[in-house]
Amino acid sequence: MTIDTVRTPRGDVIELEMVRHPGASAVVPLLENADGDDPVVLLIRQYRWAAGGTIWEIPAGVLEPGEDPADCARRELEEEAGATAGSIEKLTSIWTTPGFTDEVIHLFVAKDLTPVPTRHQADELIETAARPLSSVMSMIRDGEIRDGKSIVALLYLAGFVLIR
């Protein structure tokens, strides 16, 4: 974390706390029936200390120096969910919490998945679960999925990509 001295658009000079972040990618893995009425999504349930337990998410991770966001999404899909993608498509990019960090997460959807062994890091306690998108939407509505990047990616997919 740094303290930045900033001149605002009004001309005031203020100090702001800033967390610098290299950026990240997250990916919605679509299983069978990817273009059908109720596609199946592969979610992960991961232990998160800051959240006080396990939460539902989509695979995601930090960009390595010089790494293309799509390559990061492919890497995280393999490491966390145990799948490779035949195709990957950019959904959008979001600021996570622009009040104190410059982190941007690039959101993708992956299709034509092939299972591979996961490669979880030592601090990753992850389970995977396949759920129909209709069930995933209910999980968002009912507060079971509370992770911001996952909610944005899943709603973006449902609202702008799958619904035509």
Image (tube, rainbow, N blue to C red):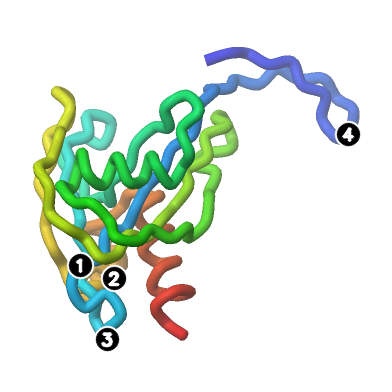
Q: How crowded is mark 2: few (under 14 residues within 10 Å), some or many (20 or more)?
A: some
What residue would you read off at disc 4?
10
Q: How crowded is mark 3: few (under 14 residues within 10 Å), some or many (20 or more)?
A: few
Identified at 29% across, 64% down, the residue is 111
Label 4 vs 2, first from the N-terminus:
4
Task: Give the residue type at disc 3.
Answer: Asp
The number of callouts visible is 4
Image quadrant assignment for residue 34: bottom left
Q: Tell me, for residue 137, which label it has, or none.
A: 2
Cβ–Cβ below 8 Å for labels 4 and 2? no
Image quadrant assignment for residue 118: top left
Rounded to the nearest angstrom, the CA distance separating label 1 from label 4 is 50 Å
**Foreground mark, 1 or 3?**
1
Task: Give the residue type at disc 4.
Answer: Arg
Task: Give the residue type at disc 2.
Answer: Met
Cβ–Cβ below 8 Å for labels 1 and 3? no
Q: Tell me, for residue 37, which label it has, or none.
A: 3
Q: Residues within 10 Å of mark 4 (few under 14, many from 20)?
A: few
Q: Where is residue 131 in the image (x, y as percent from the top left)?
A: 16, 67
Label 3 vs 2, first from the N-terminus:
3
